[in-house]
Amino acid sequence: MKKPAAGLLLALIVVVLGGAYYAYQHGYAPVPAPEPVAAVGPEVAALPPIPADNAAAPVAPVPEPAIRHPIESAEAPVAAPSADDPQDRVVAAVTELVGRKNVLTFLQVDELVRRVVATVDNLARSHAPLTLWPVNPAPGRFITTDPAPATPGETLIGADNSLRYAPLVIFLESVDTARAVAFYTRLYPLFQTAYEELGFPGRYFNDRLVAVIDVLLSTPTPANPLRVTLVEVKGSVPSVRPWVRYEFSDPALQSLTAGQKMLLRTGEVNQRRLTAKLREIRAAITRTGAAPPAPAAPARP
């Protein structure tokens, strides 16, 4: 009997990057202001109806984007969970594969599929809201060190900081890619439904997943250790948590997407190992498996 797990490998990628994200939040990242809720639109006075002879011709519907990376399963598609079974099957599947201890350690299992879909979409954007992440907070604090020679307001990400992510990376590497992608394929309707409910009707989630993976694979590999700068905040009240005001010193790195910056924070070795796993996943969820070439490694002094 096959063991289904809802996009488990995808969730695990999010878990590892989530560890970096929580370190970013609790260690040195600036806390983003809450995103404004999109307004429905300003209230306007009701307009009189347009006379029939002056009415505009009906607008042709915009065609839906062509699907680039279709998910094809040899098995019968899995229906979306019913009202009396919203998440049990998904959680049971993940627990069966990785064990209850790992699920409790790493995952936020409530609405797991929705959390994974939302976070994957956000990895290629500038901000990935904390409340949507499918992971538990990473323990411990982000490790820094002072550069030599010292530069005012600037510090380095400590070499030992990457060790905090090692258990997560090892856990991810231990999951068989073929099995995990087979699970994702079998339960793909759940992901597609969640993606459309997120606000993307007519869009194909697997195409978005491949596009996000390509963004992550294009993450540069700058020479470590990475420098971060303390952002100055003027005011008479001292900051209670000054460590949350650090940004990458390199503007090019600071301008990267949320997922790319998370990948960088895991450390050079972990980034390389995660990138290898991402390439495996991409090859398994696309027909061709072709991925962008890896960015050239920087010259070492």
Image (tube, helix red, strand yellow):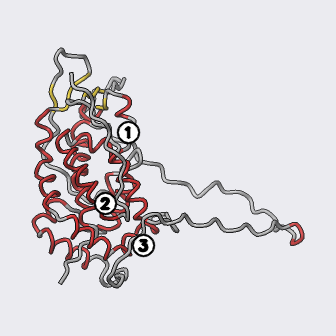
Checking the image for residue 193, the label placed there is: 3
Residue 271 falls in image quadrant: top left
Q: CA distance from mark 1 to mark 2?
A: 24 Å
Inspect the image, locate mark 1, and give the three-letter code of the amino acid beneath it: Leu
Determine whether the residue tagged by mark 3 lies in a helix, strand or loop.
helix
Callout 1 environment at 10 Å: few (<14), some (14 to 19), or many (20+)? some
Query: Which residue in the structure is indicated by mark 2?
Result: 283
Where residue 108 appears, as percent x and y from the top left, is 23, 63
* Tally of marks: 3
Residue 243 falls in image quadrant: top left
Please state, as top left, top right, bottom left or bottom right, where the C terminus lies in the image: top left
The residue located at (49%, 53%) in the rendering is 37
State which tag comes first along the sequence, 1 or 2: 1
Query: Which residue in the structure is indicated by mark 1?
Result: 256
Q: CA distance from mark 3 to mark 2?
A: 23 Å
Inspect the image, locate mark 2, and give the three-letter code of the amino acid beneath it: Ala
State which tag comes first along the sequence, 3 or 2: 3
Inspect the image, locate mark 3, and give the three-letter code of the amino acid beneath it: Thr
